[in-house]
Amino acid sequence: MAAGKVIIYGGRGALGSAIASHFKAKGWWVGSIDLVSNDNADFCITVPRDASWSEQAQSVLSGLEKVLADGKVDAIINVAGGWAGGNAAHKDFLKSCEMMWQQSVWSSTISAQAASSFLKEGGLLTLPGAFPAVNGTPGMIGYGLAKAAVHQLTKSLGEEKSGLPKGSTALCILPTTLDTPMNRKWMSGADTTTWTSLEFVSDLFYKWANGQERPKTGSLVQLITKDGKTELVMA
Amino acid sequence: MAAGKVIIYGGRGALGSAIASHFKAKGWWVGSIDLVSNDNADFCITVPRDASWSEQAQSVLSGLEKVLADGKVDAIINVAGGWAGGNAAHKDFLKSCEMMWQQSVWSSTISAQAASSFLKEGGLLTLPGAFPAVNGTPGMIGYGLAKAAVHQLTKSLGEEKSGLPKGSTALCILPTTLDTPMNRKWMSGADTTTWTSLEFVSDLFYKWANGQERPKTGSLVQLITKDGKTELVMA
């Protein structure tokens, strides 16, 4: 029998794959939701690339219903999302807003909806925020506003009558830069001692999923990395 | 010659109509953007109800280009948006998120884009926020997250290199409840002495459009009404 059950939205991205491996190594059952399947997971839902918001939700919820039957999971971890720059005068401004919205907010609202049906009482839901979006982000407006929406969604989910199961914890992580291969490629020469390692985040989620050191539900948890060491600071 | 030129996004709603009348009475040229035309305006862009984000932008930007030619406006005021309730367990949860997103965030990003091309240097852009969305809003999750996105968008637009014209001011108003006929209808029996009058908001925008008493660009301006009197409090 599995030690626990976790669903990872964005389970095939750099961070999602690292988290999946971490939980697998600890004996957990891992379900992955992404555009492509993660062969390391026990179960995958692959979402069609051009699906609408409601189609994507339908695909996720019906997939979970099938595999979980009447069972529930201990944690739903959403790490889906990408990055796009651009200010209001950029020719692709609206396109970047739309893409950021779809990647961060669609996945987060669908995760919340999934949690309302498939998360155990006392379970964990985490959503992907961003430290810069606490303030203005003029050079990446679409990114910032989508992340700000995810932050406020987390606050809502942390309150009474949000629709989440009894005793569950909703948290949002606010990293600045994650140490991924893509970031290494696109920001070569940057000071990587301020980047947060995927191992740190995976281990953090693992502890939270086991009920250890969980911040108060609804918290925005900033991941502040200095000299390769990461501290958690509540926003 | 007109005293000034203003574009009102949502110019046919209760608040938009009040603002249009106010500016017209002061001798301004008024352009309205809405699903239906405002006969009191000098110029109307009617956006098709089922238009996508980019189609709506296209319709607005090409309409403004046609009427303004090489001219610019003094102010762009966005008051588009509606309200929908529902928590994460509500059967229409995603539908409410999508509707709120379209009404508040589409109109606000398109207003920002329009401002980058059609607003004068030193001009005014205002966006529609909401006081409750500063915190969690578990009973109206889609509404809260869309408004939070508009708040953060305003902060971005208030910073350097946001793409807005030089010296312009971007502000977001955060009312709690506006004293509209619809709110009187749906919340009959409520204490309306805490509701903000449309006249107050219209006059506030008129002053700001004239460069009077403008808060610092990027500000979130809470409208706090008590005993029928409204104070501005920076969030």
Image (tube, coloured by chain):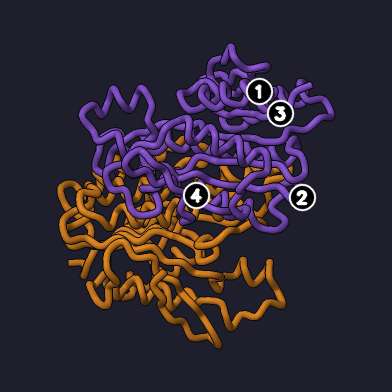
Chain colours: A purple, B orange
As measured in the structure, the alpha-carbon distance from the residue carrying label 1 to the one carrying label 2 is: 23 Å
Residue drawn where x is 37% and y is 30% of the image: A179
Q: Residues within 10 Å of mark 1 (few under 14, many from 20)?
A: many
Return the disc, 1 or 2, that comes first in the chain's sequence.
1
Q: Amino acid at mark 2?
A: Lys
Both marks 3 and 4 on one chain: yes
Q: Position of residue B171 (x, y in %)?
A: 34, 63
Alpha-carbon span between mark 2 and mark 4: 21 Å
Mark 3 to mark 2 CA distance (whole Å): 18 Å
Q: Are marks 1 and 3 in contact (CB under 8 Å)?
A: yes
Foreground mark, 1 or 3? 3
- Between disc 4 and disc 1, the foreground one is 4
Residue with the mark numbered 3: A5
Q: Chain of mark 1?
A: A
Q: CA distance from mark 1 to mark 3?
A: 8 Å
Residue A178 point in image, percent of width and height = 39, 34
Looking at the picture, does residue B2 appear above or below residue A62?
below
Residue under the point 51% across and 31% down: A80
The label number, if any, that marks residue A166 in the structure image: 2
Q: Which mark's residue is nearer the viewer, 2 or 4?
A: 4
